[in-house]
Image (cartoon, helix red, strand yellow):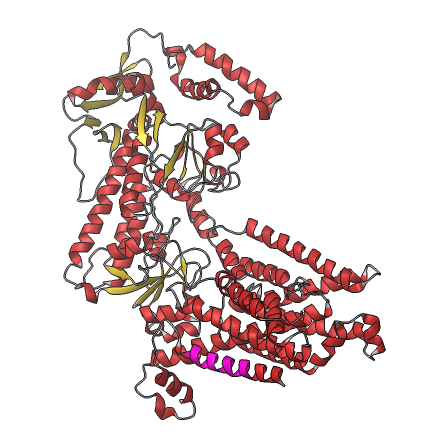
């Protein structure tokens, strides 16, 4: 389908535009597969700059020089010519402005992210130059991905099992995604694929603080925030047709799956309520969005595992019966996290014991007497749902607990995504709890990790003030 | 005379139940320790050696909750039998004029806007009263059998407030305010403390005394209005006063406990099965049975599992078999 002449597509686009203007609702429903596929094509073809296709031989350029592994030279040359039409990549043996290689390492111990345009093949910028930056951005963009697919370097489609167990055949690249599930949106942001979102539900972005930061992280946030149209329980079919997505990602507990299926839309389901499944989910998101996202997902997984094992090492000497006993409460003080919930996992990972882990299901309503029986050392309230430390410390019945008398009640921080939800940010939740309950034995610092995390995975230069508010322990 | 004995026996049962309830809980406290703690305000020496947390649990948590269950249960039982009498309809319960629906909306609104438990209670109380006021004013628009129109208006206003509550749920944040509203509407006695017990106790006790004082008149009120007049009673104003008192009692109860349906409807029937339809006996027995029933239900709700069991689950599961057993044994007329 990628060889379709440009002119045909253009005509098609004009027809569609005219048609859409006249009969908006009818045409926007993709009644047949052809309609939706052609529309996607027009988007990619526009970037091809077709007037230069006939140029005979690319001339040398004076933009920048490239040092590349031999096996990668063809693909780099191809990308260069499609981004700078009529010019040829200037390869040198040593001291190039851009290094393209399969052998690379990170400057320090932490996982780092290089522009990964093919699996395990990265581009590393060596000198300040706007052209290099643009070229790298292009190489890892869906447009670059499209070129690499056409050249046969990347697969045209991938087969992937979602977390509900169905296998999907997904054409590459994915240009338009609807996410109706907050955690999935955070996975997509943290593998730097947020530009592909055409509509998204967010976690923690409804309150003024969260939405302000989200707006700084992504200027498109107010425009693609899709709660009006799509939630786990509502699916606006008309709007879905207007947005014409390549893929919809959502929770396995979504109620409108049949509706989407009847429209012929691909729906990829996530169900990640445990650390293991969260790692799987990140891996799947990486695979969905191409080599660069996949590299970031892998970096996140090794970061997550590294932090978790470092914490376990540092608390290894604390015997099981001397571990800090933590109660994690919910939107109301007497709602507590069950053992099936992710909160229990992160408390354990941080070296504590969740006192309510014997409970099953979702948030459980308990009474204060049960809490007294558990007698937790520390109480943590979540950063959402109007939950507050004061709701506990200022309540007379909670005063019977020693933890409350000693002011051991804390609110879990968040920047946008709450740190106790099964999202990439939860690694910081583990760090924060670990530092809170085991200050003596833990030498991992919340502020350092948060700065690295948001810089690396959300591409967001977090400010000093933000760091000060999220990494506090009183 | 036998009916009085039955009432006295029920009262003794209720007091025993009250004492036993104090010893029940997830946190195990022995009977003797409970007694010592209860007497400790008078003899401070007794409480030495008992862990502080146990003392606090009994005095600050169990005692107000148990008293709350008694008052709310008694309130529902009493208002249920009073309203069944004046509406001359055995299928009437405390929500006949829309109090509960109004209170549910009031609580939902406060949960959406403010969140402070005290404001939620106040807002529920006020909207409960407002619902009945609207129903009453609405019934004045139509000049006919006032009681039937009042019932109809009560149902209409109740539906109106239910729709408004549904609207609140629709706009509420699904992660945050929505569960809070749903939980409130399900009904629970978890939140009872001495602070919110006080207004409830004042209103409920006043209401109970009032209902007991005029209990003789319910027999007349349940007759035809014309007959009541010949017997020297002004049924219209009497009914109005009763409606005001029962509304205040129900609104006060619902604003603390959330929606606990059913008790007001069924307890009067259980009372009738025991002492018959004479309100002289029916009213006291309904108060006692209501209190005892809600206390038993709540004891199970708070002790059986680590998680609280919603009262709505237990009231039907336990209440229906008891009522059916009573119906088999009894031969009294309705």
Magenta highlight on residue B13: yes
Place of residue B311 in the rendered image (x, y in percent of width and height, measured from the top left) = 49, 64
Q: Quadrant of the C terminus of chain A?
A: bottom left
- The residue drawn where x is 31% and y is 39% is A281
In the image shown, does A220 or A432 lie closer to the viewer? A432
Place of residue B54 in the rendered image (x, y in percent of width and height, measured from the top left) = 35, 79
Magenta highlight on residue B187: no
- Magenta stretch, residue numbers: B9-22
Q: In this view, does A32 lie above or below A250?
A: above
Q: Quadrant of the N terminus of chain A?
A: top left
Q: How many marks?
A: 0
- The residue drawn where x is 58% and y is 59% is B109
Which picture quadrant has residue A169?
top left
Q: In this view, does A389 lie above or below A50?
A: below
In the image shown, does A140 or B272 lie closer to the viewer? B272
- The residue drawn where x is 36% and y is 34% is A193
Which picture quadrant has residue A24?
top right
């Amino acid at each position: 389908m990628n060889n379709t002449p440009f002119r045909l597509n253009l005509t098609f686009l004009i027809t569609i535009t005219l048609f859409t203007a006249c009969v908006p609702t009818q045409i926007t429903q993709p009644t047949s597969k052809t309609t939706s596929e052609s529309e996607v094509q027009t988007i990619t073809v526009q970037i091809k700059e077709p007037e230069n296709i006939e140029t005979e031989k690319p001339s040398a350029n004076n933009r920048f020089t490239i040092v590349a592994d031999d096996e990668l030279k063809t693909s780099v040359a191809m990308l260069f010519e499609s981004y700078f039409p009529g010019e040829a990549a200037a390869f040198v043996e040593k001291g190039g402005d851009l290094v393209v290689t399969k052998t690379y390492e990170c400057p320090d111990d932490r996982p780092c992210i290089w522009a990964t345009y093919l699996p395990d093949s990265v581009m590393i910028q060596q000198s300040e130059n706007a052209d290099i930056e643009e070229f790298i951005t292009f190489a890892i963009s869906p447009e670059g991905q499209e070129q690499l697919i056409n050249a046969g370097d990347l697969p045209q489609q991938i087969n992937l099992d979602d977390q509900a167990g169905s296998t999907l055949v997904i054409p590459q690249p994915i240009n338009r995604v609807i996410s109706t599930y907050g955690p999935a949106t955070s996975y997509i942001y943290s593998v730097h694929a947020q530009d592909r979102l055409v509509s998204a539900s967010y976690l923690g972005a409804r309150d003024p603080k969260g939405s302000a930061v989200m707006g700084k992280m992504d200027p498109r946030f107010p425009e693609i925030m899709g709660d009006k149209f799509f939630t786990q329980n509502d699916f606006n079919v008309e709007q879905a047709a207007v947005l014409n997505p390549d893929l919809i990602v959502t929770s396995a507990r979504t109620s409108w799956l049949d509706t989407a299926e009847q429209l012929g839309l691909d729906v990829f389901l996530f169900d990640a309520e445990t650390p293991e499944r969260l790692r799987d989910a990140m891996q799947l998101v990486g695979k969905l969005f191409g080599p660069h996202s996949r590299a970031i997902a892998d970096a996140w997984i090794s970061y997550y595992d590294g932090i978790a094992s470092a914490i376990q090492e540092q608390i290894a000497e604390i015997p099981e019966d001397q571990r800090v006993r933590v109660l994690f409460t919910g939107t109301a003080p007497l709602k507590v996290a069950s053992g099936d919930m992710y909160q229990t996992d992160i408390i354990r990972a941080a070296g504590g014991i969740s006192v309510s882990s014997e409970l099953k299901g979702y948030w459980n309503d308990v009474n204060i007497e049960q809490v007294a029986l558990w007698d937790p050392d520390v109480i943590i309230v979540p950063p959402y749902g109007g939950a507050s430390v004061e709701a506990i410390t200022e309540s007379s019945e909670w005063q019977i607990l020693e933890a409350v008398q000693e002011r051991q009640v804390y609110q879990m921080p968040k920047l946008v995504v709450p740190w106790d939800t099964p999202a990439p940010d939860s690694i910081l939740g583990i760090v924060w709890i670990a530092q809170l309950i085991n200050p003596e034995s833990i030498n991992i610092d919340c502020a350092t990790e948060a700065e690295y995390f948001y810089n690396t995975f959300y591409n967001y230069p977090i400010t000093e003030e933000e760091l000060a508010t999220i990494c506090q322990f009183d | 005379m036998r009916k009085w004995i039955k009432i006295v026996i029920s009262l003794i049962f209720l007091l025993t139940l009250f004492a036993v309830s104090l010893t029940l809980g997830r946190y195990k406290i022995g009977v003797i320790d409970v007694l010592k703690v209860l007497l400790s305000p008078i003899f401070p020496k007794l409480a030495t050696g008992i862990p502080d947390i146990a003392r606090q649990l009994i005095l600050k948590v169990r005692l107000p909750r148990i008293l709350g269950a008694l008052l709310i249960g008694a309130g529902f039982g009493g208002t249920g039998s009073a309203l069944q009498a004046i509406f001359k309809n055995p299928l009437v319960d405390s929500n006949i004029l829309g109090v509960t629906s109004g209170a549910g909306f009031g609580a939902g609104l406060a949960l959406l806007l403010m969140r402070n438990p005290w404001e939620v209670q106040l807002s529920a109380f006020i909207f409960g009263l407002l619902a009945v006021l609207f129903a009453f004013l609405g019934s004045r628009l139509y000049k006919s059998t006032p009681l039937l129109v009042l019932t109809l208006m009560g149902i209409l206003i109740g539906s109106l407030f239910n729709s408004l509550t549904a609207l609140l749920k629709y706009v509420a944040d699904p992660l945050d305010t929505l569960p809070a509203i749903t939980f409130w509407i399900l009904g629970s006695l978890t939140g009872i403390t001495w602070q919110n017990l006080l207004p409830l106790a004042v209103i409920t006790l006043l209401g109970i005394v009032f209902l007991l004082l005029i209990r003789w008149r319910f027999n007349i009120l349940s007759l035809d209005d014309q007959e009541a007049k010949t017997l020297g009673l002004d049924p219209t104003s009497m009914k109005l006063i009763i409606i005001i008192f029962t509304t205040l009692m129900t609104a006060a109860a619902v604003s603390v406990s959330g929606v606990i349906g059913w008790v007001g409807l069924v307890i009067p029937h259980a009372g009738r099965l025991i002492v018959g339809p004479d309100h002289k006996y029916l009213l006291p027995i309904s108060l006692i049975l209501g209190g005892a029933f809600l206390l038993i239900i709540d004891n199970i709700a708070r002790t059986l599992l680590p998680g609280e069991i919603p009262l709505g689950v237990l009231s039907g599961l336990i209440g229906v078999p008891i009522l059916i057993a009573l119906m088999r044994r009894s031969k009294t007329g309705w």
